[in-house]
Image: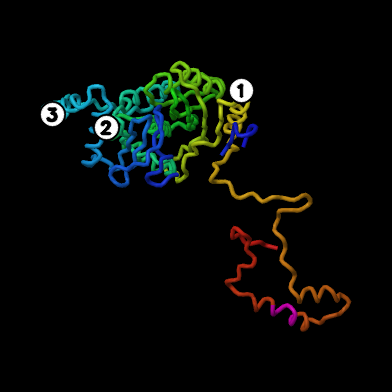
Amino acid sequence: MTGSGSNASRSAHPKGDKGGRSRSTHARPVSTANNGGSEEEDKDGGVLFLVNKSGFPLDGQTWERMWGHVAKVHPAGREMVATIRNADCLPKPSVPAVPNYKTSMTIPEWLQAIQNYMKMLQYNHTGTQFFEIRKSRPLSGLMETAREMTRESLPIKCLEAVILGIYLTNGQPSVERFPISFKSHFSGNNFHHVVLGIYCNGRYGSLGMSRRSELMDKPLIYRTLSDLIFEFEDSYKKHLHSVKKVKIGLYVPHEPHSFQPIEWKQLVLNVSKMMRSEIRKELEKYARDMRMKILKPASAHSPVKQRSRGKSLSPRRRQASPQRRAFRRDKSRHLDPIELAGIFRPAVMDKKVGDFSTLNEVGYQLRI
């Protein structure tokens, strides 16, 4: 934990958990209504936010639900939906090519190619997120979802863009990636958004998708992490949003087969209750710790034992056996070899193979 009070803190999701869903710049009051059994519906200021959990191709229920939702929220309503669904011939959608890194490219050029690819996929305005993103999944599983995004070439939302950005930058070990989440407030509602922070060669930037061009990618030009966060905060102000919280995760490993989940919120700042000088101090300390790679995921921390003054946390020695204590007390007594054998042999013979008395709490054998 950093900072004072509750302003800053450092710190899964089974199927259906709201914490693992994409949270775009919509307000998200939670609805308790269910639609179709396991499919839960959230509401963003009265507008439903739906997730496809049926995979591809979409099942009939998800397909009809998506069109029904579009008919409710689109200005043209059912007339627009009927025009598209009853059309005899529709233009074939373009399928953008997945970008390939070339040795002649600089890192900023490669990041721009990735962002251009995301823009060609377009932002998803249907109200149904096509790819289910569970934040607690291992990185390997999320990379499978990213590969599916490249195969299907469907519009994506902000959380999907973060996973896709991680997938496409996996081959560049000099590019560090970490999630940045924002909670903003506007007109009585809270809005959530997430982008992929980038650090490379002493500069910060971002990749992402949003309805607003100012709230997605940022060029790799910011000297400090606080400069990047303040740039996003200023962009929010242009749309009359006030940023309430900023959550920053840890660097994402470059191993696509890792079973380690992404750490989404290692640092949480209540920026609405902090001065900019305080925010800058917290961010720069956190950025320095990340660069030094001394931060560990919250799930990796083992319970910490409280240490009292003058007491060691090292394992205690076992109490000496009665035979050895008796032998030590009477050092003046002379024992011949036969008596010595009689004293020490029982301790060896009585020891059982399955005796775990020499194991500590975590199962490691102590050699004394």
Q: Does any portion of residue 104 appear in the rendered image?
A: no
Q: Quadrant of residue 85?
A: top left
Q: Earlier in the sequence, mark 1 or mark 3?
A: 3
Give the label on residue 254, or none: none
Q: Amino acid at mark 1?
A: Met
Mark 1 vs mark 2: give the one in front.
Answer: 2
Report the span colored magenta: 341-346
The answer to which of 187 and 324 lies nearer the viewer is 187
Q: Amino acid at mark 2?
A: His
Q: Which residue is mark 2?
A: 69
Q: Point out residue 257 in the picture as x, y percentages from the top left corner.
A: 42, 43
Query: Residue reaching furthest top?
Result: 238
Q: Quadrant of the C terminus?
A: bottom right
Mark 2 vs mark 3: give the one in front.
Answer: 2
The answer to which of 225 and 1 lies nearer the viewer is 1
Identify the residue at horizontal 76%, vertical 75% (top origin): 322
Q: Which residue is mark 3?
A: 86
Query: Does the residue at mark 1 contact the one at mark 2 (Cβ under 8 Å)?
Result: no
Q: Which residue is mark 1?
A: 275
> Relative to residue 110, is residue 251 drawn left or right?
right
Residue 349 falls inside the magenta stretch? no
Residue 169, relative to residue 344: is it above or below? above
Q: Amino acid at mark 3?
A: Asn
Residue 18, relative to residue 278: is it above or below? below
Q: Point out residue 24 in the picture as x, y percentages from the top left corner.
A: 39, 29
Q: Earlier in the sequence, mark 1 or mark 2?
A: 2
SS under mark 1: loop
Q: Point out residue 89 in the picture as x, y percentages from the top left corner.
A: 12, 26
